[in-house]
Structure formats: structure tokens, C-alpha cells
Image: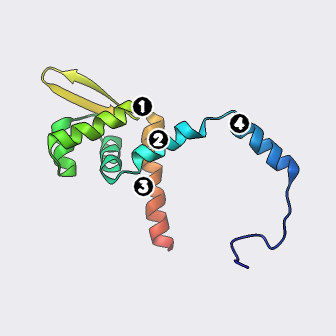
Amino acid sequence: MAKEICDVVCVDEEKVERVQQQLSEQNPLEVAKIFKALSDDTRIKIAYALSLEDKLCVCDVANIIGSSTATASYHLRLLNNMGLAKYNKEGKLVYYSLDDAHVKHLVQVAFIHQKEVVSVG
């Protein structure tokens, strides 16, 4: 047998019930959508850039990720639609920022974790 699975079946009914109850009160599909939005290489670069700066205009984002403003705008709009980023228009410029501290923390923790996995593995 593979060493990644139990050799015998042993279920802790109390733990299973407790976790199932807590899980039933959550919306895993919506959480999965957040991770799906961030699973794109371009969007995670943008999210990381926005985690480093309070706000960036679309032109800055395009230059940071090495794309056209249309491509940057597309990905920023998707992040906005997913509730991960927000924008405001100042004169002729549109500035984006992460929606809140939770998103910033999520992105930064993911990058910290990735560095730790690389250094360990």
C-alpha cells in the first residue's frame, strides 16, 4: 500500500461531525473562486504588485507585468469582479488597489509559503 494513506480504516466520528457541521456553514465554492482567480500567473503578479503598493494605475500595472494596458485592464477587471481588487478614477487615470487587508494578507502569505517550500524541498 502507499504510505500516504491509512493502512486501516479508523473514523473519529466526533471530529468528522464537528468539521462537517462547520463546513456546512461555509461556502467553499465561493472560496474556490478566489483561489481560481489568483491561480492565473498574470493575476497573481498583479495581486502581488498591489500588495506592495497601496494603489497602482492601469499603466503602471501593465509595465510591471510587461503587458499591454488592455491585458492589464482585463485582469484587473476580473480581480475587481471577484471582489479581490477595487478601483477609483482620479481625473484621467484609473487606480486599482486590493479590496482589503484580508486579500493583501492572503497574497503575501502565499508568496512567503512558496519561498519556504522551495527552501525546504
User: Residue 70 at what x, y percent from top left?
Assistant: 17, 39
Mark 2 is on which residue type? Ile
The answer to whether the residue labelled 1 contacts the one labelled 4, judged by CB atoms less than 8 Å apart, is no
Q: Which residue is mark 2?
A: 34
Name which residue lies at 45% across and 56% down.
Answer: 112
Q: Quadrant of the N terminus?
A: bottom right
Q: In front of the other: label 1 or label 4?
A: 4
Residue 49 makes an appearance in the image: yes
For label 3, the SS is helix
For label 4, the SS is helix
What is the distance, in whole Å, between disc 1 and disc 3 at their CAs?
20 Å
Q: Which residue is mark 1?
A: 83
Mark 3 is on which residue type? Phe
Name which residue lies at 70% across and 40% down.
Answer: 23
Query: Residue 100, located in which quarter of the rendered image?
Result: top left
For label 1, the SS is loop
For label 2, the SS is helix
Furthest-top residue in this view: 91
Q: Is residue 5 above or below residue 19?
A: below
Task: Give the number of the disc on residue 24.
Answer: 4
The answer to whether the residue labelled 4 contacts the one labelled 2, judged by CB atoms less than 8 Å apart, is no
What is the distance, in whole Å, between disc 4 and disc 3 at their CAs?
29 Å
User: Residue 87 at what x, y percent from top left?
Assistant: 29, 27
Is 17 on the left-hand or right-hand side of 71?
Answer: right
What is the distance, in whole Å, between disc 4 and disc 2 at their CAs?
19 Å
Q: Is residue 43 above or below residue 87?
A: below
Residue 98 makes an appearance in the image: no
Name which residue lies at 45% across and 61% down.
Answer: 114
Q: In front of the other: label 1 or label 3?
A: 1
Mark 4 is on which residue type? Ser
Q: Which tag, 1 or 3, sits closer to the chain's start?
A: 1
Q: In front of the other: label 4 or label 3?
A: 4
